[in-house]
Every structure is written in C-alpha cells, then in structure tokens.
Amino acid sequence: MPDQTRLARLSETLYWTALVLSAVLPLIVLFYAGKGLADPASLLARASGLPAETPVTRLQAGLVAAIALISVLPMVAALRAMTRLFGRYRAGEVLSDTNAETILQIGRALILVAVFTVVTPTLVTLILSWNAPQRTLSIGVDSGTLGFLMAAGLLTVIGWAMREAARVKAENEGFV
C-alpha cells in the first residue's frame, strides 16, 4: 500500500506539472512567433552562419512561425497524454490496457519531438537564408537529441510491454 500512496503523490505532482506545461508551452511559442512576425530581422539570431545584414521578409517570418507552431504539437500531445496517465495513476489505476496505450502514445509523440528537434532548426535556417548571398543548410544532431530519441524509443517499448502485461492480467482475472 505505501508504494501506491507514493505513486499517487508523485502522480499528483506530475499531473499538474504536465497540465500546466501543456497550456503554457504553446503560449510561449505563440509569443515568440509573434515577436518574429513583428521584427523579422530578429529571427537571424536563430540561424548562426547567416550574415547579420541578410534581409528577412514577413513571408519568411510567417513560415518560421508556422514551423514553430507545428513543431510544438507533438510535445503538447505528449504532455496531454501524460496528464491522462497521471490522472489514472493517482486514482489507483496502474496496470491497464488504457494506460499501456497512453504510454505508447507518449513514446510515439516523444519520438516526433526528437525528430522535430533536428528538422525544425534545419528548416528555419534554410528559410532564413533565402535572401542571403548563399543559401545555408545546417543539420545538427547532438548526443542530447540521440539520448532523448533513445528514451522515447524505450518508452514506446515499455508501452508495448505494458499492453502485453495488461492482456495477461485480464486473462488471469478471467480464470479466478
């Protein structure tokens, strides 16, 4: 019983953290997207290697804003799924098919987050370099991104394993 109490307490904290982040994160991205639209030249700070005098149009700023808004969606989806999962954990529902599916959804969403971590800066640099004397394509993968991708993959596998465990649990309950 103490483990379940600990799980409920931790899930309560994580529930509220994920809920708040799922609401605040898109607002932060919207704020910075609006700043970029208001002052397109300020976006050059995101693209190292481009000359400071490179002109940036509102169209470019709009595309960068759209990419930023699209790239935040998988993280918001993961946070909302975490909110559902932690809500069920704090209610005492631990090993269920629903939770396994939710963990699987979270893992898949976080894999997309890792992909967007590489793709988004690459696209932003390419878009911002349209009016530069020389277009720039910069692709970067670091150990943090690879570690995040591995953790997301692990979470996906855990979701599959939990699905199987929930199925076996349901079968065993049918025999009792």
Image (cartoon, grey):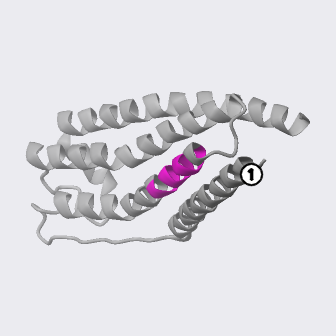
Of residue 99 and residue 126, the one placed in the foreground of this image is: 99
| Circle 1: element type | helix
Of residue 76 and residue 133, the one placed in the foreground of this image is: 76
Q: How many marks?
A: 1
176 relative position to 57: left or right = right
Residue at the right extreme of this rendering: 2
Quadrant for residue 116, please give it.
Answer: bottom left
Residue bearing the label numbered 1: 175
Residue depicted at 40% across the width and 58% down the height? 112
Q: Position of residue 95 (x, y in %)?
A: 69, 46
Query: Chief secondary structure of the magenta span?
Result: helix
Above or below, comparing residue 47 to residue 176 in the picture: below
Of residue 132 and residue 137, the one placed in the foreground of this image is: 137
Residue depicted at 14% across the width and 72% down the height? 134
Q: Position of residue 23 (x, y in %)?
A: 44, 28
Of residue 93 and residue 103, the one placed in the foreground of this image is: 93
Residue 105 within the magenta-colored segment of the rendering: yes
Q: Position of residue 76 (x, y in %)?
A: 42, 40
Residue 111 within the magenta-colored segment of the rendering: no
Residue depicted at 37% across the width and 30% down the height? 27
Above or below, comparing residue 136 to residue 32 in the picture: below
Residue depicted at 25% across the width and 33% down the height? 34
Above or below, comparing residue 174 to residue 153 in the picture: above
Q: Residues within 10 Å of mark 1 (few under 14, many from 20)?
A: few
58 relative position to 44: left or right = left
Which amino acid is tagged 1? Phe
Q: What span is in magenta?
A: 99-108
Q: Position of residue 91 (x, y in %)?
A: 69, 28
